[in-house]
Amino acid sequence: MNALIVDDELLELEQLEYMLQSECPNWKIYKAADANQAHDINRSFPIQLAFLDINLPGKSGLEFGEELREINQEVDIIMVTASQNFNYTQQSIRIGVFNQANHRK
């Protein structure tokens, strides 16, 4: 499994990478600090799972998630944020982010 973590906070990137590698040692983890880096990674490697921070410099995680979904309809997307803004939740659902209720088995 190829997983992509996109977050502009270095500590958050490292913590999420550590947690994923601890639980899923066979996964290949790619990291990006913004949507531009994430696009480059996505063009080079088949991403199956993406963890996207909503608040990124430049293009938001939601905008990148929409573009990622257009390129790769099979990718599962999990939004990562500390924000409590419900509008983000609504936008995330609209682009089809990962949800336990609609997870493909």
Image (spheres, rainbow, N blue to C red):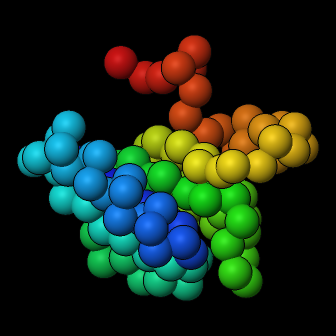
Residue 3 quadrant: bottom left
Residue visible at 35% across and 18% down in the picture: 105
Q: Would residue 2 be seen by someone viewing this image from the given angle?
A: no
In this picture, residue 9 sits left or right of residue 24 = right
Residue 59 quadrant: bottom right
In this picture, residue 17 sits left or right of residue 71 = left
Judged from this view, the residue extending furthest toward the front is 11
Q: Position of residue 50 (x, y in %)?
A: 45, 53
Is residue 96 or residue 12 the one in the foreground? 12
Residue visible at 60% across and 47% down in the picture: 79
Q: Position of residue 95 (x, y in %)?
A: 70, 45
Is residue 102 or residue 33 the one in the foreground? 33
Residue visible at 56% across and 57% down in the picture: 52
Q: Is residue 90 above or below residue 17?
A: above
Q: Is residue 103 above or below residue 19?
A: above
Residue 57 quadrant: bottom right
Is residue 37 or residue 23 the one in the foreground? 23
